[in-house]
Amino acid sequence: MLVPYHEEMTREALAPHFSAGALDIIIAANLKQDSLRGQIGHDEYHYDNNAIEKGDRYIIEQRGYVLATLLSPGILGAWIAFGRLLHTAQDFYAHTNYVTMWLDEFNGAPPPPPEIDPLRKDLIKSPGLHSGNIYLPMDALYFVRPLRPLALKLLPQNSHGRMNLDSPEQGPKFEYARAAALKRTQYEFDLLRKILAPEMFARFTDK
Ligand SMILES: [Zn+2]
């Protein structure tokens, strides 16, 4: 997803729960995953190139860092790990065909975006789940505005350029990806609320 949407969703879901300072650090860590260094050689940060298992593992790993940091007196590492975790969890809906598979069940008359279930196990585990492949150089040219129409003509159906739901420009499916990512953000927070001891949770939210 494009940076403004990662930020907007994260704020919307988490502003009531975290101090402003903590939230800023979480968001900065989330957005940093889309820097050039986070783009090259890190398919797992964004579920790119069919890195489904690697993306899942990355989320689990970052959740582990949140816990490990909170078990020590530290805190900064927990916020950074949570921001990284959220980036990947949000990109899942923008870069895989999860939203398409969910919508396909409604024969063209789907319920409105807020009703999307972001955690349907059968879809998450479906053999049909895949994400966009990055075909260079065309997927790089896709990001050069004037060249986008040409790149799209040459990119295959299963490319990042053709599959992504990174912004509203991608059409009505974007709102479903955004709604699913927003719910998932809330879910990831609720999960930590459940597993963290009260003292750790208080330190984590910094409220
Ligand atoms: Zn990303």
Image (spheres, rainbow, N blue to C red):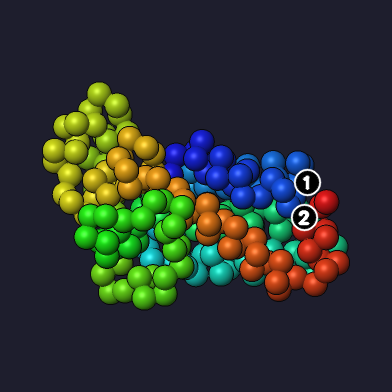
Which of the image's four quarters has the N terminus? top left
Which residue type carries mark 1? Answer: Ser
Seen in the picture, residue 156 relative to 56 is either above or below; the reply is: above
Q: Secondary structure at mark 2?
A: helix
Where residue 188 sits, quadrant-wise, is bottom right
Task: Inspect this view and state whether residue 177 appears.
Answer: no
The residue shown at (23%, 55%) is 108
Label 1 neighbour load within 10 Å: few <14, some 14-19, many 20+: some
Residue behind mark 2? 205
The residue shown at (31%, 74%) is 126
Which residue type carries mark 2? Answer: Thr
The single residue placed furthest to the top in the displayed view is 146
Q: Position of residue 192 (x, y in %)?
A: 68, 67
Seen in the picture, residue 53 relative to 97 is either above or below; the reply is: below
The residue shown at (52%, 65%) is 58
Residue behind mark 1? 19
Where residue 49 sits, quadrant-wise, is bottom left
Q: Position of residue 136 (x, y in %)?
A: 25, 44
Is disc 2's CB within 8 Å of ligand 1? no
Q: Is residue 176 left or right of residue 158?
A: right
Seen in the picture, residue 25 relative to 203 is either above or below; the reply is: above
